[in-house]
Image (cartoon, grey):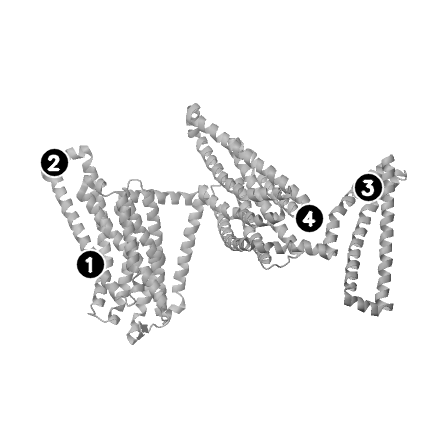
Amino acid sequence: MISQFIGCVSVTVCLILVVIVYLRIYIILKRHKNQIEGLQIQEVQQGVQNGDLSNFLKLRKSALGTFYACIVFLICYLLSYILYFLLLARLLSSISYYKAWPHTTTLFFLNSSLNPVIYCWKMGPIRRALMDNSISDYQDFRPALVANCVFNSFLSYTNIFLNIITIHAIRKTALLPKPLRTLLLSLVATDVGVGLLVQPLYISTLVSRLKQKRIDCIYDKGLSVVINFFCMSSFFNVVTISVDRFLAVHLHLRYQERVTQKRVIAAVISTWLLSAIISSNVFWDPLFIISQVIGLVIITGCLILVVIVYWRIYIILKRHKNQIEELQIQEVQQGVQNGDLSNFLKLRKSALGTFYACIVFLICYLPSYILSFLFMAHFLNSISYYKAWPHTTTLFFLNSSLNPVIYCWKMGPIRRTLMDIMRGILSAIDNLVIWYLMEENICNLFNEFFSGTSANVKDFRPALVANCVFNSFLSYTTIILNIVTIHAIRKTALLPKPLRTLLLSLAASDVGVGLLVQPLYISTLVSRLEQKRIGCISHRGWSLVFTFFCTSSFLNVVTISVDRFFAVHLHLRYQELVTHKRVIAAVISIWLLSAIISSSVFWDPLLFSSQVIGLVIMTVCLIVVVIVYWRIYIVLKRHKIQIEGLQIQEVQQGVQNGDLSNFLKLRKSALGTFYVCIVFMICYLPSYILSFLLLARLLSPISLYEALLYTTTLLFLNSSLNPVIYCWKMGPIRRTLVDIMRGIVNRFRE
């Protein structure tokens, strides 16, 4: 009772004192105002010269600022004081008091939040200090700020691109459970927000720091709202996904019953609402003290929760592994029959995938968390904090770019969907190229050839149009067939490693032909149709790409032919002499030699020496191919005679030892590559003969121009036919391709 009376008296005295003080301030300011305006003009002018007037105006403005603070103070405190006085004087019942008490107390607390806002608004030095944020201290941070600007510019682009593709892939992936799909979509949506809004705003802030510009208070608040909203929602989404994966492993068969789609949607909405509430702290906590404490408490709790969750997942997976391997073999076998084991393994793989995401998440978030904790605990001064702050914030944003990469790597359904999307993008690009080629601008007359104009060039227009259309189709088929062949070769375990390496090298060069050479060739034909002169740089670039991939494809076929000859000729010694390391060395030599030959456009501008060297190499290779397949034919014919006629007993003994079956496989493989060589000769010989005629100047370029168009297209045709021959003639690759096609058909049916 005594303390209440003393408190009431103290508050009364303080309120009276405040009123008297501000009344005296008002009287003094009014008197000075009258002096300035009326009686003492000369003295005021002299005061301006001495700087007295400016000082007085500053004091006046400061007094007005504190006056506004006092008005707010009285509004917030008077109601609580009056209510308390009425209760002490027993003019108010306790029930009425407790009805009004929560409102007056809240108004009482509101004053603490409003005071700094008023200081920031009304007192210039404080406002400038708050907005300045020690700009001079940032002069030493210039290299770090520039590096973070550049890195965040790159990160923002990759973040948006990767997350948008991931959203599309998640929506297209039917094999993902609905709860997990909803959580992943929520996480990726927040990551898109980070790349689309947060990082550009953050970059603009760093640029303002570099230019030593003051950041506007409203802009700073908006930036804080956006950063807190998206980053906190991303944080909460990762925590929610971790809990979801724990429930999937822990509940097992009860997971679908407990974790329903409605509950997951409610959890996602809650994470976004909680992020919005936390991000709105700039309006009710201008100095960010309370919000920083709350944020640190929430982040600490979430980090502890994530660690506990993944520790429990590890224990559960370890226990299930022991049960599967040792104790419960019969139950495991029964589980396999019922499909329980396969479901558990899927959940285990999914949990491991999100575990990798969580590890990256901790690496990205922990430095920022530790830095904020040290700064709030006063273990770190502001200079050290602002030195490390840009780096930890950039690492913070890096998590949004890494999440979709981890989903692509670790979650099989999403990865497969992304591969399908990329194939669709390639198909769309090729359709755009075909559409462009079929536009009306292809109908322009072509009357310019090499260095001058010729009337005979008009006759080449049908050939140009036909080659444009045919190469557009060939480019698409070359890319698709060779990519599928590469995938089939990699999946075929029965192929010997040396042959697999050579076939992969050939298919890779053929992909380059379809992906780069043919589109560039089509653009060259279109330029001829539009009567445009092709620039020197464009012509050299086209020659470089054309020579590089076509030469590598040519040399790869020659090397495969020699390899098949060794396989038939050496027989049992083949694996000993033709090792995988030697084949890799040969493949590297092929690509290096192709690069050296294709670089002739830089050291031989007229291409005379390179054409001579190319013809010599092609002549030697063609002779080698003919000799090799002639020797293969002789070896196979001799073995055939041995099998059918003279050495039946030895052949039967060879069958028992497995030698005959191995030889027949080699023979079939050699025949397959022989068909490749026949096609290769048909495709390359016309171009070789035409190049020889041009080099020997036996015919004019104009007379051979139309033939040159068709022979070049025939040369490109080889890259499309190679994978088809592998599918037809090599059994292991053919069977793998059939399995791949069945899988694709089954997926479409599902």
- The mark nearer the N terminus, 3 or 2, is 3
- The mark nearer the N terminus, 1 or 3, is 3
Residue 619 badge? 1
Identify residue for label 3. 100
- The mark nearer the N terminus, 2 or 1, is 1
Q: Residues within 10 Å of mark 3 (few under 14, many from 20)?
A: some
Residue 648 badge? 2
Q: Residue at x 31, y 54 (%)?
A: 510
Apparent side of residue 558 relative to residue 747 in the rendered image (left or right): left
Across and down, in percent, residue 626 comes to 17, 53
Identify residue for label 4. 287
Cα gap from disc 3 to disc 2, whole angstroms: 114 Å
Point out the residue furthest to the left here. 646
Cα gap from disc 4 to disc 3, whole angstroms: 29 Å
70 or 44: which is nearer to us? Answer: 44
Apparent side of residue 494 relative to residue 407 in the rendered image (left or right): left
Q: Relative to 11, does residue 431 appear above or below in the rendering?
A: below
Q: Which amino acid type is shown beneath numbered disc 3?
A: Ala
